Image (cartoon, rainbow, N blue to C red):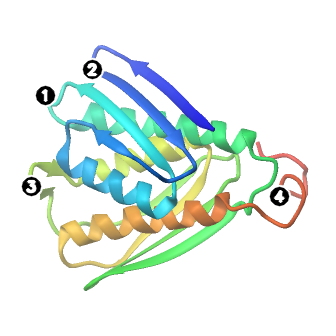
Amino acid sequence: MTYQKERSTKETDIKIQLRLDGEDSHINTGVGFLDHMLTLFSFHSGIALNIEVDGDTHVDDHHTVEDIGIVIGQLLLEVVKDKKSFTRYGSFYIPMDETLARVVTDISGRPYLSFNATFSREKVGTFDTELVEEFFRALVINARLTTHIDLIRGGNTHHEIEAIFKAFARSLKIALTQDDYAGIPSSKGVIE
């Protein structure tokens, strides 16, 4: 099944399609480093993404990065609402050479982000590293996830961010996996 959403503001025009088959992603955000991170996210989560963005990157990358997080989060919320059963919890560690990141995710219906990462540098190329937290905050709030992101050991800034994106992707993949339990994975009988 394909989920799709568009978001148009005075700052960005975004079209995203999301599929759980994990094949044939096409990502063009106008922000090269983010394209790279979303390609890794797609591969490691098994979620195919087709993304086209026209954003005000002549100002900076903030609006584009945040708005993409918003739309991906909204699409993930639709996926969760459609699934009859899923594991709900996922956690993963990713080492990237000298760097180690851990992400723990709960498809809880209660949005919360704990972001504990201090990056070695303020930029990777032209990309502002502070936008990593903005992206995940937008995604987590709109997908209604509880997510803890921890950069346990740092080093190369590219590796630090890449480890976080990969660990998030893998934790989400586990959380979305079909569970043997038939029904919503909550003693309350509802995820809200």
Query: Which residue is the extreme one toward the front?
Result: 24
Pointers 3 and 2 in contact (C-beta within 8 Å): no
Give the spatial CA distance, label 2 vs label 4.
38 Å
Give the spatial CA distance, label 1 vs label 2.
9 Å
Image point 40% across, 26% down: which residue? 15
Which kind of residue does numbered mark 4 sit on?
A: Pro
Q: Nearer the viewer, mark 1 or mark 3?
A: 3
**In the rendered structure, which disc, 3 or 2, sits on the residue that comes first in sequence?**
2
Q: What residue does disc 2 label?
A: 11
**In the rendered structure, which disc, 2 or 4, sits on the residue that comes first in sequence?**
2
Q: Residues within 10 Å of mark 3 (few under 14, many from 20)?
A: few
Which kind of residue does numbered mark 1 sit on?
A: Val
**Percent from the top left, x then y, of residue 55?**
24, 26
**Percent from the top left, x then y, of residue 13?**
32, 21
Give the spatial CA distance, label 1 vs label 3.
16 Å
- Compared to residue 154, the image places residue 45 above or below, namely above
Q: Nearer the viewer, residue 145 or 182?
A: 182
Q: Is residue 115 left or right of residue 155?
A: right
Give the spatial CA distance, label 4 vs label 3.
42 Å
Query: Which residue is the extreme one toward the top?
Result: 10
Label ID, residue 125: 3
**Percent from the top left, x then y, of residue 138?**
45, 41
Pointers 1 and 3 in contact (C-beta within 8 Å): no
Label ID, residue 185: 4
- Compared to residue 182, the image places residue 170 above or below, namely below
